[in-house]
Structures are given as C-alpha cells and as structure tokens.
Amino acid sequence: MTTTSLLRKAKPVNIREAQASLSKLIRSQSISMVLSHGKPVSFLIPYEELLDLVETLDELKDRRLLEEIKRARAEYRQGKAVPAERLLNKMSS
C-alpha cells in the first residue's frame, strides 16, 4: 500500500469520537485518521498494514534497489520495457 492510498482510504474521525469508540475502531480493522479541530493528529492503522509499510521503508534503505528503480523509471518514460530477468536478479541479490 502506498502512503497516498493510505491517506485516501483513511476514515476521518474526530478525537472525541475516537476516544469514545476506540475499541470499535480497532476491531473494524480499517484505517482511521484522527482529527482535532479538523486537522489530522494521528492514524489508526491495522497491524498487518503497518508491517507492510515498515517493510517498504526498509527496502528503501537499499541504495542499489533505489538506483534500479530510478533507472527503471527512466526507461519506462522512454518507452522501454524493463526486462523481468534483470528485475528478478536485482531482487534476489
């Protein structure tokens, strides 16, 4: 999940409502954006989705992977396909 889709998917809930129905919000397994005076102050994110985001952040620490992504994006803009074999080789190293 991208951060943009995370934000779009989040159900806005004011802070008082969140306090009153915290266990219900947690059980719903949905993403909630807690608002105070109409401004975001916190998120409730299901554990598995948070793990996915943390894994993605860990992958972004890999400079070689970032360079590969940069090169692939440039090739894509030029209309070139990125060979799956090269991508798989990079992912396994």
Image: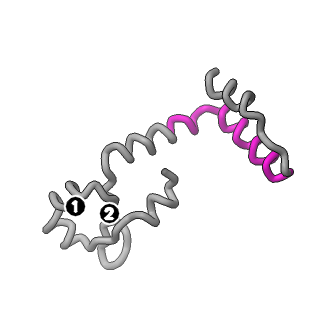
Residue at figure coordinates x 45%, y 63% from the top left: 7
Label 1: which secondary element? helix
Which residue is identified by label 2?
32
Q: Nearer the viewer, residue 17 or 83?
A: 83
| On screen, residue 72 above or below 77 | above
Q: Quadrant of the C terminus?
A: top right
Residue 61 occupies which quadrant of the picture? top right
Q: Amino acid at mark 2?
A: Ser
Crowding around mark 1 (Cα neighbors within 10 Å: few <14, some 14 to 19, many 20+) is many
Query: Residue 83's spot in the image, x, y percent?
Result: 77, 34
Query: Residue 65's spot in the image, x, y percent?
Result: 66, 33
Crowding around mark 2 (Cα neighbors within 10 Å: few <14, some 14 to 19, many 20+) is many
Which residue is identified by label 1?
25
Q: Is residue 77 magenta?
A: yes
Label 2: which secondary element? strand
- Can you name the residue that lies furthest to the top here? 93
Q: Amino acid at mark 1?
A: Leu
Magenta span main SS: helix
Provide the residue span drawn in magenta.
57-78
- Can you name the residue that lies furthest to the bottom here? 37
